[in-house]
Image (tube, rainbow, N blue to C red):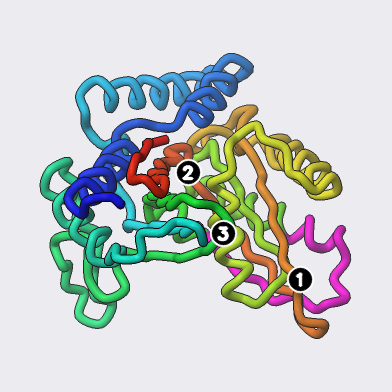
Amino acid sequence: MIVEEDFLKAVKNIITKASLDLPEDVVSALKTAYEIEQTPTAKAVLNSILNNIQLAKKLRKPICQDTGLPFFIVEIGRRFNDCKIDYENILTRAVKESTIEIPLRPNCVNPLTDLNTGDNTGRHAPIIFYNFNNTDSLTITYFPKGAGSENQTSLYMLTPSSSLKYIKKIILKHVVKKAGLSCPPIIVGVGLGGAADTALLLAKKALLRPLGSKNEDTSLAELETELLDLINKTGIGPMGLGGDTTALAVHIDYACRHTASLPLAISIQCWAARKAQLVINKTGDYKII
């Protein structure tokens, strides 16, 4: 069993890690993009991004001034035996305290009054999704996403007869229109099928998949590779200024759909793909990834 204050401290640690330290898979992908880039302007942009990452790490300052809207995924193992944790209370406290201590930019605003709550919490904030799995551990993923890329999210309710060729066309057209607004190089998350909300969640969660990893579904892996190649051939480039690397990856997931509908959701992540994970086992020991 984990002590509540230890749990709070651990959650604050992943908020800090995500805000200040870009994951190694993302840094590696950006370095590769820099090495292969042929356009001088694009190379300069990528160099600035890499310098920014190092300065954030050195100075212990947020990677981006937009520290995102707090978003958590809580995965509870069925054999994880600590059921006394008030997840929502702890995560909310962690966000409030981290907003002051790191500090984070207050981004949480009432949509009716336009009043900022001042601490990144409020009605349905932080955003928390819960999943259950067959493990004996608890995993909490913190995934702050800025408005620049979040604003480029779209949901398309296609007819069930839509061909794969048409779906690819929709994805490519969307990225061409939105990539330059999303601080590229971007990561493209695609959710296909399910209901509307399912597709949107699948698209967002697809952004969390490690860069360089292969989709377990062979046909989807091929589709991801094809779309990534087509996107990078557009020449939109880093920060939309032209270049060889517009996207670092395309990640696709799907869910079985209703016979009469075909949702397609597209979520775009900017180059600052921030994420951190807390894993707690049933004895209370934990690690941060």
Instruction: Name the mark nearer the viewer: 1 or 2.
Output: 1
Residue 113: % across, % down: 20, 80
Which mark is on residue 270?
Answer: 2
Earlier in the chain: of badge 3 and badge 1, it is: 3
- The alpha-carbon separation of the residues under discs 2 and 3 comes to 29 Å
Name the residue that disc number 3 marks. 133
Report the front residue among 214 and 168: 214
Q: Say what amino acid the circle numbered 3 marks.
A: Asn
Quick check: 122 left or right of 34? Answer: left
Residue 136: % across, % down: 49, 51
Residue at screen point 57% across, 74% down: 197
Quick check: 125 left or right of 149? Answer: left
Q: Say what amino acid the circle numbered 2 marks.
A: Cys
Quick check: 69 left or right of 224? Answer: left
Earlier in the chain: of badge 1 and badge 2, it is: 1
Report the front residue among 27 and 93: 93
- The alpha-carbon separation of the residues under discs 3 and 1 comes to 19 Å
- The alpha-carbon separation of the residues under discs 1 and 2 comes to 28 Å
Name the residue that disc number 1 marks. 256
The residues colored magenta run 153-170
Instruction: Name the mark nearer the viewer: 3 or 1.
Output: 3
- Name the quarter where the C terminus is drawn: top left
Q: How many marks?
A: 3
Residue 253: % across, % down: 69, 56
Q: Is residue 86 above or below residue 186?
A: below
